[in-house]
Amino acid sequence: MFNVEYYCKGGIEMNNVIDVMMNRVSLRKYDERLVAKEHIDIILECAMRAPTAGNMMLYSIIKVEDQKKKDVLSKTCDNQPFIAKAPLVLIFLADYQRWYDYYIHSQVSDYCKSKGVKFEGPSEANLMLATCDAIIAAQNAVIAGEALGIGSCYIGDIMENYETHRELFNLPKWVFPVGMLCMGYYPEGYNKVKRERFDEKYIVYTDTYDESYKDNIKDCFKNIERRFNETNEFGAKNMGQVHYAIKTGAEFSKEMARSVKVALKNWNSEIIE
Amino acid sequence: MFNVEYYCKGGIEMNNVIDVMMNRVSLRKYDERLVAKEHIDIILECAMRAPTAGNMMLYSIIKVEDQKKKDVLSKTCDNQPFIAKAPLVLIFLADYQRWYDYYIHSQVSDYCKSKGVKFEGPSEANLMLATCDAIIAAQNAVIAGEALGIGSCYIGDIMENYETHRELFNLPKWVFPVGMLCMGYYPEGYNKVKRERFDEKYIVYTDTYDESYKDNIKDCFKNIERRFNETNEFGAKNMGQVHYAIKTGAEFSKEMARSVKVALKNWNSEIIE
């Protein structure tokens, strides 16, 4: 697909795997150009080559081209207008429907009866596994895009408003949208600003989980604490309170909690006749 | 970290982002060498640079060095002996504990009382969001490894036996292991065999989910169907029945369903006092 000689002649910036990952930032403002079909093809090919549990590919991808649907998403996903302007929008669906349709087509019901066992539908664990599959594929798409000069932003808010999205995209029962990517070329001269992460010692442990961060919680959260403003709009006395107010306490979060609870009801290992 | 000039002189194989993703296979047999500390550092750095919801890093990583713990994992994760032999084992945990401890430290309880609202613990949606964060980080680790000649295999079975893993790794309440990576250098002369994926037309849709694969289900599943053996050990009449028997119908799958149901009980938006 790519030619080493070509890259090494410096025709375009070299694609170095580690550099691409280390320099990636979330991009919410895109160049107006459409993403080239050749680039979309590469992004999707990399997504579909991603590791997948038992080679089952427990996901599907919806490429949203319809501007009206992008407009809806920009409202249903926590009112983020930039979604409507993204040149490329990909929804990653956790998908067990394909396999259960295959099982039904294969008379698994008869097989189970002959063995004296129950034919069970997907469980909550299957949703989790399919979510992993979908997100692994999504991250390959992110990195492939980045290597091609195409920035991206994940929209977890696609888990909100399940009923609306189910209708908008004709989703069958055992399909749930777990991630969305807005993508587009970096605008010319875009200034990447990398956000600070937690220190490695608070994220990576050896052999056992370590709760000792609790003794250094101010140090652990120092990059967050720095952003505290005493005259905040929430009437909060510290950054932890502000953060709760803008996350768990916020409307989008309550909607996501509700939406996922509704969707989870489909993933209850029900008996299929 | 890497020097373009050096790579282009052909000192070692060039790291091309797209090629690395397109040529990756799951590796279950590793060279005996330990993974170099410098390489582990790069893998973890790339993981921690991965996109994360609201920059919250809703995950932790446990590097399993203790051989006894690897031995346990090789049994609790659906009896896969190669896990015990993997030079590098990384467990990716969906983790809301860190943030809730910060909220508690920040007297969010008092804040909520002053506002007349309830202080809510993590919801099922928070587990889903944290799972996405953890897996996005894991996939960066996979790709970084691959670029360094380090192969990997995802073990979704880490979601089984929740109680055992909770005890083995001292996991607090709002931490759940969603993925594990076994990693190690490719053995010399390893012959990569890429498994066939579903055709793109059955995975990628435009603007709406498309159930028309049902009309072409034999074509959709042709790579799977090819593996059917009439004298199979399950007494199954077709490949769909075999597949159900080795997946949803299998012990590991029932255990994963049970384990996730138990873990999910912690993620019920409980009121924190």
Image: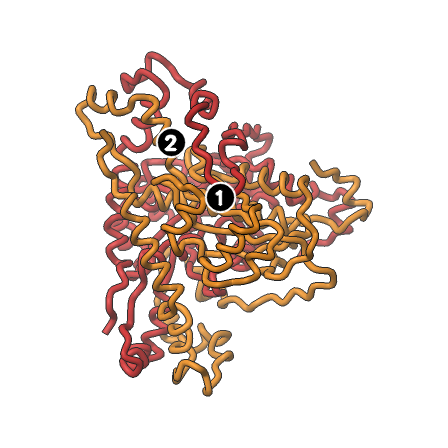
Chain colours: A orange, B red
Looking at the rendered structure, the kind of residue marked 2 is: Trp
Helix or strand or loop: what does disc 1 sit on?
strand
Task: Read off the residue under disc 2.
Answer: A99
On the image, the x and y values in percent for residue B200 come to 54, 32
- Residue occupying the point 30% across, 42% down: B76
Residue behind mark 1: B183
Along the line of sight, which residue is nearer the eye, B175 or A62?
A: A62
Is B53 situated left or right of B250 in this image?
right
User: Would you call the spot at circle 2 few (<14 residues within 10 Å), some (14-19), or many (20 or more)?
Assistant: many
Percent position of residue B172, x then y:
30, 61
At which x and y percent is residue B209? Answer: 46, 39
Q: Are marks 1 and 2 on the same chain?
A: no
Q: Secondary structure at mark 2?
A: helix
Q: Nearer the viewer, residue B204 or A239?
A: B204
| Disc 1 chain ID | B
| Mark in front: 1 vs 2 | 2
Left or right: B154, with B39 as reference point: left
Is A210 located above or below residue A3 in the figure? below
The subunit carrying tag 2 is A
Q: Say what amino acid the circle numbered 1 marks.
A: Met
Q: Which residue of the protein is positioned furthest toward the bottom in this rendering?
A: A231
Quarter of the rendering occupied by the C terminus of chain A: top left
Query: Image point 29% across, 77% down: which residue?
Result: B109
Q: Is any part of residue A121 visible from this angle?
A: yes
